[in-house]
């Protein structure tokens, strides 16, 4: 299916360390998006990377895309307690209604 | 900008009752999405409107679910009759254009509990 699958399902690290979350998918995509969800809140868009792009940076966030491996990664550098949240990748296929299909997410915990 | 507004934030109802969830998208956005989030199934797209017209309702689980968008600034999701398995958090989101091309802005969600 098109749905992205995040890995790991849960990640716990110390404040200041880097956090890497991965997303794999099965079918060709138009773009891939990363979202963050704090507990009890709605999702917040972090980044959109198109199929012809390989890497994007935004502050402490770095997103990579490898279409040959059908995978993406989200790296958060110098993590902070406020980064504690669930992180979702969402893929947009190249056919059909081009809707976002979300993965199950990675639960990231930053320990102070 | 106030962002996407949803009401109510919490709803507790009994099985068989009608439930109506409301959403006001960000002004100027022409796409609106209804999602449902549960622990078991994650985040699922229920229906997607573009310029007030339903584009994809393949995620609507049953005929008990219906959604309308009478104008660019308002949408409803109705469940009639409600069942305990409908308990979930329902999110509304909006974007500037077609689903895949733009980031989506999510509302705070409505937590629905059906007893």
Image: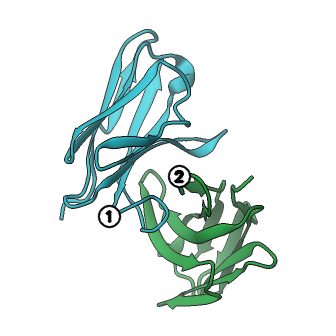
Chain colours: A green, B cyan
Residues at circles 2 and 1 in contact by the CB criterion of under 8 Å: no
In the picture as drawn, the residue positioned furthest to the right comes out as A69
Secondary structure state at the residue bearing disc 1: loop
Position of A98 compared to A103: left or right? left
Disc 2: which chain?
A
Percent x, y of residue B18 = 35, 15
Position of A102 compared to A22: left or right? left
Q: Is residue B39 above or below residue A39?
A: above
- Residue tagged 2: A97
Q: Which mark is residue A62?
A: none
Give me the residue at 46% from left, 39% from top: B89
User: Which one is nearer the viewer's eye here, A86 or A51?
Assistant: A51
Position of B63 compared to A27: left or right? left
Position of A93 compared to B76: left or right? right
Secondary structure state at the residue bearing disc 2: loop
Crowding near pointer 1: few (<14 within 10 Å), some, many (20+)?
Answer: some
Q: Based on the displayed image, in which of its 4 quarters is residue A111 positioned?
A: bottom right
Give me the residue at 35% from left, 21% from top: B19
Percent x, y of residue A86 = 57, 62
On whether disc 2 and disc 1 are found on a single subunit, the reply is no
Crowding near pointer 2: few (<14 within 10 Å), some, many (20+)?
Answer: some
Percent x, y of residue B4 = 28, 54
Give me the residue at 81% from left, 76% from top: A69
Q: Is residue B84 above or below residue A41?
A: above
In the picture as drawn, the residue positioned furthest to the front comes out as A95
Q: Which mark is residue B96?
A: 1
Q: Marks 2 and 1, Cα distance to the nearest angstrom? A: 16 Å
Disc 1: which chain?
B
Give me the residue at 55% from left, 36% from top: B58
Quarter of the picture holding the N terminus of chain B: bottom left
Q: Nearer the viewer, mark 2 or mark 1?
A: 2
Percent x, y of residue B12 = 38, 23
């Amino acid at each position: 299916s098109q749905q992205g699958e995040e890995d790991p399902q849960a990640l716990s690290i110390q404040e200041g360390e880097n956090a890497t979350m991965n997303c794999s998918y099965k079918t060709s995509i138009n773009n891939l998006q990363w979202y963050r969800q704090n507990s009890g809140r709605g999702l917040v868009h972090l980044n959109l990377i198109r199929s012809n792009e390989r890497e994007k940076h935004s502050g402490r966030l770095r997103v990579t895309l490898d279409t040959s491996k059908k995978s993406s990664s989200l790296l958060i550098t110098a993590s902070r307690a406020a980064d504690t949240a669930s992180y979702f990748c969402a893929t947009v296929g190249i056919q059909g209604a081009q809707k976002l299909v979300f993965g199950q997410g990675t639960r990231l915990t930053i320990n102070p | 900008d106030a962002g996407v507004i949803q009401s109510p934030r919490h709803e507790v109802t009994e099985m068989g009752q009608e439930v109506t969830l409301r959403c006001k998208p960000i002004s100027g956005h022409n796409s609106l999405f209804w999602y449902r989030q549960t622990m078991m199934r994650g985040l699922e797209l229920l229906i997607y409107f573009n310029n007030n017209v339903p584009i994809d309702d393949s995620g609507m689980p049953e005929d008990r679910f219906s959604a309308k968008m009478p104008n660019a600034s308002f949408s409803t999701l109705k469940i009639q009759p409600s069942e305990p398995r409908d308990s979930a958090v329902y999110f509304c989101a909006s974007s500037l254009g077609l689903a895949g091309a733009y980031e989506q802005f999510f509302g705070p969600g409505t937590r629905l509990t059906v007893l």
